[in-house]
Image (spheres, rainbow, N blue to C red):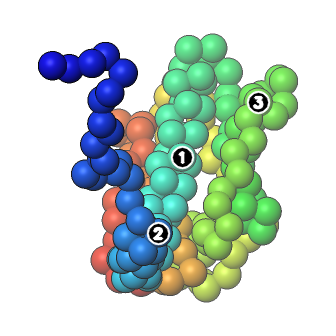
Amino acid sequence: MLSVGNRTRRPKRHAAGMTLLELVVVITILTLMAGLVAPRMGPWLEAWKLRSAAERVAQTFRYARSRALFEQHFYVVQILPQQSLVKVLQQNSGVIREIPLPEGIQIIEEEELAARRTPEVFSFIFPPSGEVEEKNLWLRNSQGRTVKIHLNFLLGSPGVEIAEGGS
């Protein structure tokens, strides 16, 4: 016969959670893994910044060319290497956009690459006809890796190419 108030309590066999020791071991393993992976991320991150800067400059050229065609006005893209800045100017209204480039990115035009000098301003003119002068522009990071932006006069659109090694 069971009486209602006479139940005996059974102890719980397994408590949910983890011990402090288990937590310290897991954190130590994760820290060791991060320490092994982090040094390999540096060169990849620098290459990604260089490539994204080149894509940003190429997109700025595309933007200026399409605006020149659509609005039938001259547009100028000015690149200021010392300030790491790209400006888009319209014939009548002045500066439309300013795009900063990441630190450590050096901008070199092909003629200056041969002469080993860097001018204060590079200017690229986009007329209403959409025709552009064929030019190459080089971006280089602090590790010496280069990316070439090629303005094609036939297509009028810039292409970005990864250059092998340094130039």
State if disc 3 and disc 1 touch (CB < 8 Å).
no
Which residue reaches farthest left? 1
Residue placed most toward the observer, 38 or 18: 18
Image position, residue 32 (x, y; %):
39, 81
Above or below for 74 versus 120: above
Left or right: 96 with respect to 130? right
Residue placed most toward the observer, 23 or 80: 23
Q: Name the quadrant containing residue 64.
A: top right
Residue at 50% across, 28% down: 130
Q: Which residue is mark 2?
A: 20
Compute the Cα span from label 1 to label 3.
Answer: 16 Å
Q: Nearer the viewer, mark 1 or mark 2?
A: 2
Q: Which residue is mark 3?
A: 96
Q: Amino acid at mark 3?
A: Ile
- The mark found on residue 56 in the picture is 1
Left or right: 101 with respect to 15? right
Q: Could you tell me which quadrant the N terminus lies in?
A: top left
State if disc 2 and disc 1 touch (CB < 8 Å).
no
Above or below for 166 versus 47: below
Residue at 34% across, 65% down: 162
Residue at 68% across, 67% down: 103
Residue 121 in sight from this viewpoint: no
What is the secondary structure assignment of the residue under circle 2? helix
Image position, residue 39 (x, y; %):
44, 82
- The mark found on residue 143 in the picture is none
What is the secondary structure assignment of the residue under circle 3? strand
Residue 72 in sight from this viewpoint: yes
Compute the Cα span from label 3 to label 2.
Answer: 58 Å
Q: Nearer the viewer, mark 3 or mark 2?
A: 2
Q: Residues within 10 Å of mark 3 (few under 14, many from 20)?
A: few
What is the secondary structure assignment of the residue under circle 1? helix
